[in-house]
Image (cartoon, grey):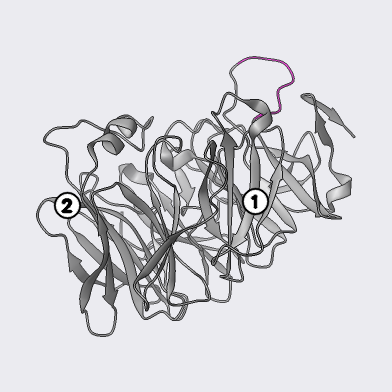
Amino acid sequence: MTKGRIWPTERKSFHDPITGAAITQLTDYFAHSYHLYFTNNAWYDSNTKLLIGSDRENSTNLYSIDLLSGELTQLTELKRNQKKSIQGTFINPIKMEAYFTLDRNIFAINLETYQEKTLFELPHGFHFSNLSCTADGNHLCFGLTEDLSHSLKSNLSGGYIGFEETEAARPHCQIWLLTLDTGDVKIIHEDQLWIGHINASPTQPNLITFCHEGPWEKVDHRIWLLDIDAGRKWKVAEGEPNQYAGHEYWHADGLRIGYHGFTDSLERKDGKFLGSVKFDNTECERYHFPYQNMHIHSKDNELIVGDGQQTTAYHGSFYQDCLFLWKKHNDLMEGPRVLCKHRGSFHIQQVHVHPCFSPDGTKILFTSDMSGYGNVYLVDVPAFDTLPILQNNKLVK
């Protein structure tokens, strides 16, 4: 387990048995491998390389996949018992540098030399939330959450144990801004509420989203926007009082925010919706559809991917565990059409499917433990009309 070690290609290709879509499996190892969180761009070096996490040789580390050769390069040399957030790694959009948390520190890693440096030390009484880099590459935004481990047992990445209890405890949370050139830090927002999912706009250096974390129907409002320069925050995508939206992400233009949600409760099948809105709450588009996704992602309003739900252990024709596509046509959202089976278990955070489009929109990146271990896959996006439609849990080709 050595920094800079080159692993030979594990790449293999196959076609989805349902749709015929071309799929490339990028990793194949008897341990979990997974791509970065779906809001974090994982491509770099002119989109020829991809950052992933992998648990090979009994420890989680950061790896780079050369998309031309398929070779993997180990970038970090971390110990198993160190507390780390490799899945939350964020790449600087301007320079060859990425950021992750390790134990009580934020580290920067040079993606060419693999040298690491410490940027920030966690103050006593807190633990890290997630981090994000502003569009100009000048600042890191990151969250700190009050440490409740002395009074509350939780395992949020493994079954969301303690999820409701953490929200109810109202932990003190802060959003910090770190200037990369100088190391200067300051708190730009704090509240006696559980805050998470800090996510910088990919084009507007002054805009970030964050969420009030917890069960969506219990928090005051999920999606918020903060203007760093003005110091002003506001709700985004506020619908009716019984509508709950979340899993927000930025469109590629850095101006619109995508999301999905439900009405009243997850059990109500006819109340599901997906949509997007400009950061200032103008140009809202919302589409109702009778289907439940764990996450959705898109580059814009035109084509949206969703990851459905968990796979089943039973035989028969089940299609909830697929990647689905929706396409906008004449102000309506057509679909879902089945892109491929993912057969993901969603058992722990690392093997959530988390589909996301490639920078050029021609492929979709996803993680699946269909083989028993999490692996990283790329599926080609064919013409929408060539894919089968899912109607009443039956495929119509």
**Residue 78, percent from left and from top:** 26, 54
Q: Secondary structure at mark 2?
A: strand
Distance between mark 1 and mark 2 Cα atoms: 34 Å
Whether 164 is drawn above or below 204: the answer is above
Tell me which residue sits at (56%, 43%) in the image.
295
**Residue 307, percent from left and from top:** 62, 40
Q: Residues within 10 Å of mark 1 (few under 14, many from 20)?
A: many
**Residue 26, percent from left and from top:** 58, 51
**Residue 40, percent from left and from top:** 48, 60
From the image, tell me which residue sits under label 2: 126
> Which dot marks residue 127?
none
Is residue 87 in the magenta section?
no
Question: Quick check: marks 1 and 2 in contact, CB under 8 Å?
Answer: no
Tell me which residue sits at (57%, 62%) in the image.
281
Q: Residues within 10 Å of mark 2 (few under 14, many from 20)?
A: some
| Furthest residue in direction bottom, as rendered | 181
Most common secondary structure along the magenta stretch: loop
Would residue 97 be visible to someone looking at this image? yes
Residue type at numbered disc 1: Gly
Q: Residue 240: name its quadrant.
A: top right
Tell me which residue sits at (79%, 42%) in the image.
335
Please report the bounds of the magenta region as a residue range: 314-320
Q: Residue 143: name its quadrant.
A: bottom left
Q: Residue 9: name its quadrant.
A: bottom right
First-in-chain label (1 vs 2)? 2
> Which dot marks residue 275?
1
In which quadrant is the C terminus drawn? Answer: top right
Asked whether, in this view, residue 261 is left or right of residue 165, the answer is right
Residue type at numbered disc 2: Phe
Asked whether, in this view, residue 385 is left or right of residue 378, the answer is right
